[in-house]
């Protein structure tokens, strides 16, 4: 674990994440964050921690990854007084976009960002709920750099340590920090 979350804060967040066995398919233990979002104390603690990280990173923009990353990132941007930029699945944003494909376990996917929302001089913090295989996060880092912005850091609520996300992101981070508030 890295980042500014206390042991009590980590325990609060972890106590509000519900394990759902065999969802979305048999053998998967889904980590449901909706109880955390429904608890104003836990959600506020999470948001405050991410705002603190945004300050440490020197972020000037916050990118949230579809879809739960939007829920976590938007209040951070508001509290930090900086812009929020959604990274969406392909075909969901109107106007000119930059797109990035990435590999899934079985096939590929594509994410997009509005081309004008990021620019040279922006220091971008990426926020998502879970770091699993790292594919979406890695693609977002590529999009940020292609837009001319700098990656200030990546923060996730939860890292699944039994999956290769951190290792996959290592080279793409290029020295930027990766903070997981909870590691399971």
Image: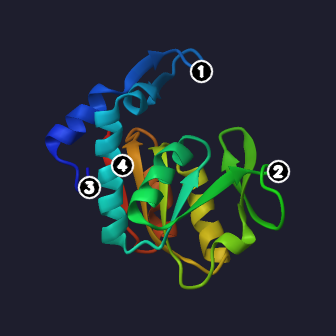
Q: Position of residue 54 (x, y in %)?
A: 37, 65
Q: Residue at x 54, y 40 (%)?
A: 68
Does residue 46 appear in this view? yes
Q: Identify which residue is drawn at 61% across, 75% down.
A: 145
Mark in front: 4 vs 2: 4
Height in image: 42 above or below 144?
Answer: above
* For discs 2 and 3, the disc positioned in front in the rendered view: 2
Between marks 2 and 3, how big is the CA–CA gap?
35 Å
Q: Nearer the viewer, mark 1 or mark 2?
A: 2
Mark earlier in primary sequence (2, 3): 3
Q: Is residue 24 above or below residue 68?
A: above
Q: CA–CA distance between discs 3 and 1?
A: 29 Å
Which disc is residue 2 wearing?
3
The disc, 4 or 1, on the residue closer to the chain's N-terminal end is 1
Q: What element does badge 3 sit on?
A: loop
Q: Are marks 3 and 1 in contact (CB under 8 Å)?
A: no
Disc nearer the start of the sequence (4/3): 3
Q: Residue at x 60, y 84 (%)?
A: 120
Give the residue number, with chain letter if any, for mark 2: 91
The residue that mark 1 highlights is 24
- Mark 4 and mark 3: Cα distance apart in space: 16 Å
Q: Is residue 19 left or right of residue 114?
A: left
58 and 142: which is toward the camera: 58
In-image side of 76 versus 48 (left or right): right
**In-front residue for pair 6/133:** 6
Instruction: Check disc 3: other Cα within 10 Å, few if <14, some if 14-19, many if 20+.
Output: few
Residue bearing mark 4: 47
Dot 2 falls on a residue whose secondary structure is loop
């Amino acid at each position: 674990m890295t980042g500014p979350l206390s042991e009590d804060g980590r325990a609060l967040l972890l106590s509000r994440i519900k394990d759902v066995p065999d969802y979305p398919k048999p053998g998967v233990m889904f980590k449901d964050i909706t109880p955390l979002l429904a608890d104003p104390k836990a959600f506020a603690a999470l948001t405050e921690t991410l705002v603190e990280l945004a300050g440490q990173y020197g972020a000037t923009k916050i990118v949230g990854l579809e879809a739960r990353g939007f829920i976590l990132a938007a209040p951070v941007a508001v509290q930090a007084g900086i812009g929020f930029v959604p990274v969406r699945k392909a075909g969901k944003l109107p106007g000119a976009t930059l797109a990035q494909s990435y590999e899934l376990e079985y096939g590929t996917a594509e994410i997009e960002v509005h081309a004008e929302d990021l620019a040279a001089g922006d220091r971008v913090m990426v926020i998502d709920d879970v770091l699993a295989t790292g594919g979406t996060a890695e693609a977002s880092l590529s999009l940020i750099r292609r837009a001319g912005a700098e990656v200030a850091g990546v923060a996730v609520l939860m890292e699944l340590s039994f999956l290769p996300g951190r290792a996959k992101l290592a080279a793409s981070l290029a020295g930027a920090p990766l903070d997981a508030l909870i590691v399971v």
